[in-house]
Amino acid sequence: MEAAGERMNLLLCCLGIAALLRSSLACPRTCTCSIKKNGRLLAECAYKDLQEVPEGLSPNVTILTLSANRISSLWESSFSEVPEVQSLWLGYNQINSIEPGTFAQLVHLKNLDLSHNKIVDFPWKDLRNLSGLQILKMNNNRLARLPRDAFYSLKDLRSLWLNDNDLTTLAEGTFDNLPSLSQLQIFNNPFNCSCKVFWLKKWTENTSVSITKGGSILCVAPSRLKGRAVTDIPDHYCVAPSVQLTYLSNLDNTVMYDGLTLTLHCSVAGNPPPQIRWKIQTSSRSIEINGPNVARNGNILRPELSKQSQEHFLVFKNGTMAIPNFSKDDEGIYTCLAVNDVGTREVSVNVALAGSENPADDLLRNAPQASHLGGRSCYKGDELDPSGAGEKLVIVYHMPRESKSKAGGVSQIWLGTLLLTLGITLCC
Ligand SMILES: *[C@@H]1O[C@H](CO)[C@@H](O)[C@H](O)[C@H]1NC(C)=O
Ligand SMILES: *[C@@H]1O[C@H](CO)[C@@H](O)[C@H](O)[C@H]1NC(C)=O
Ligand SMILES: *[C@@H]1O[C@H](CO)[C@@H](O)[C@H](O)[C@H]1NC(C)=O
Ligand SMILES: *[C@@H]1O[C@H](CO)[C@@H](O)[C@H](O)[C@H]1NC(C)=O
Ligand SMILES: *[C@@H]1O[C@H](CO)[C@@H](O)[C@H](O)[C@H]1NC(C)=O
Ligand SMILES: *[C@@H]1O[C@H](CO)[C@@H](O)[C@H](O)[C@H]1NC(C)=O
């Protein structure tokens, strides 16, 4: 009898353990759940024809395999039962819709496999929360766009698979801020090899990241590069802009009747030929002019675009800007930007007016090291002072006594021009 009692106790005890196990092993009918040697809880639900993420998973699941099912949508609540999950395998489904927030709560994720689905839009912001992610597989989907900062918080990301998607371009810097990245797959995407992706060639040449099948990152456009590898884009096709700003003065021995006309000339080089834009920052206003507003014949272009304030600044197609009747109000920072698909360069000059009877006084007072007087001078974008304020150009005008008396009241102004050089090489 005693033995029977003990057996009974044993049985009850075993049942108890089983019940305990069952609760900690809560497992949907279609799945197989098990505790791995390292104590991790594995829920295997692959190859089950599932159309949804199953319910009834233990909150302790750390590995969840749902590969090779027929899941097409993921919702914010799809994985709310498994907040501890570290590895989530969702490859070979039919996922085409992912609600924002689906992954944001899975802060313990280390491995996420979404390969071989039909994903067009992904809630990239969800990745910001996944700072422990090490492996991200999104290959064989239909991704056509990738935000530049999609991966910025993934400090531990080692492996990134984006091959076999519909990416036509990648923004420069997409793979910055990934200190752990060691393997990248981006082949088999229909890259448009405009100079917007030229950075990728330069990056692959210099990075320590192993780029799988780098030679198979092919261009499908433009036609002249079709079939060629991104890494083979000839360097001379894509040349970053260079820019230099010249101050042209014909004032040295000119009598001006109409006030001072300041003329700045911005010359640019690069491939594709850069566009020229101007930014003007005076004490009272900020103006941007993104193209010529005066035709060669002097007619105002695009009058609907040129606000009254802009008409004062005459921007010509050849890179010249003229500011007639330059006044105290026009003092400020004049910036010329050269923009093409490879990048942007800018150069600024800080223009100030100073009135004096003797320009040499001002020159000596303001910049004893000044080495240049009048005529013409230029500033190269490459040598730009990083503070961005621009080098200082001071225009000193003066009215000689004899001219005042001779002209007898007529506003006839003699102009002298002084350039103060502050830590910059003068050229031309
Ligand atoms: C989850 O695991 C912890 C120990 O890691 C355990 O105490 C707890 O009972 C488990 N919860 C469930 C619902 O299984
Ligand atoms: C991101 O993670 C934090 C915890 O680290 C959590 O509080 C927050 O809710 C998560 N964000 C989202 C959108 O789930
Ligand atoms: C490629 O990109 C360039 C520059 O962005 C664009 O002008 C051109 O239309 C694109 N070509 C194709 C085929 O998408
Ligand atoms: C190449 O990489 C090194 C560091 O790995 C960096 O200092 C250098 O600026 C890079 N050169 C170019 C051209 O990007
Ligand atoms: C640019 O064009 C304007 C108007 O045709 C002309 O006055 C100016 O001298 C030109 N600038 C240069 C540097 O050729
Ligand atoms: C400059 O100002 C004078 C009067 O102050 C005016 O007669 C002249 O038309 C102005 N010139 C331009 C180009 O605006």
Image: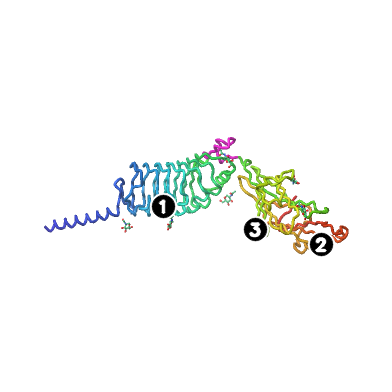
Q: Is residue 174 left or right of residue 38?
A: right
Label annotation for residue 54: none
Question: x and y percent of residue 146 in the render?
Answer: 51, 46
* Image-quadrant location for residue 388: bottom right
Task: Tell me the SS state at disc 2.
Answer: loop
Question: For the residue marked with disc 2, what is the amino acid?
Answer: Asn
- Decide: few, some or many residues near mark 1? Use Cα within 10 Å; few <14, some 14-19, many ≥20: many
Q: Is residue 413 left or right of residue 74?
A: right
Q: Which residue is mark 3?
A: 387
Distance in Å between CA atoms under marks 1 and 3: 42 Å
Question: x and y percent of residue 141 in the render?
Answer: 45, 41
Q: Which residue is mark 1?
A: 109
Distance in Å between CA atoms under marks 2 and 1: 73 Å
- Decide: few, some or many residues near mark 2? Use Cα within 10 Å; few <14, some 14-19, many ≥20: some
Residue under the image location 59 percent in, 43 percent down: 195
Question: Relative to 278, is 116 above or below?
Answer: above
Distance in Å between CA atoms under marks 3 and 2: 31 Å
Viewer-nearest of labels 3 and 2?
Answer: 2
Quadrant the N terminus occupies: bottom left
Instruction: Write down the region rendered in magenta.
Output: 215-233
Q: Are marks 3 and 2 in contact (CB under 8 Å)?
A: no
Q: Residue 311: in sight, yes or no? A: yes
Q: Which residue is mark 2?
A: 358
Q: Residue 318: in sight, yes or no? A: no
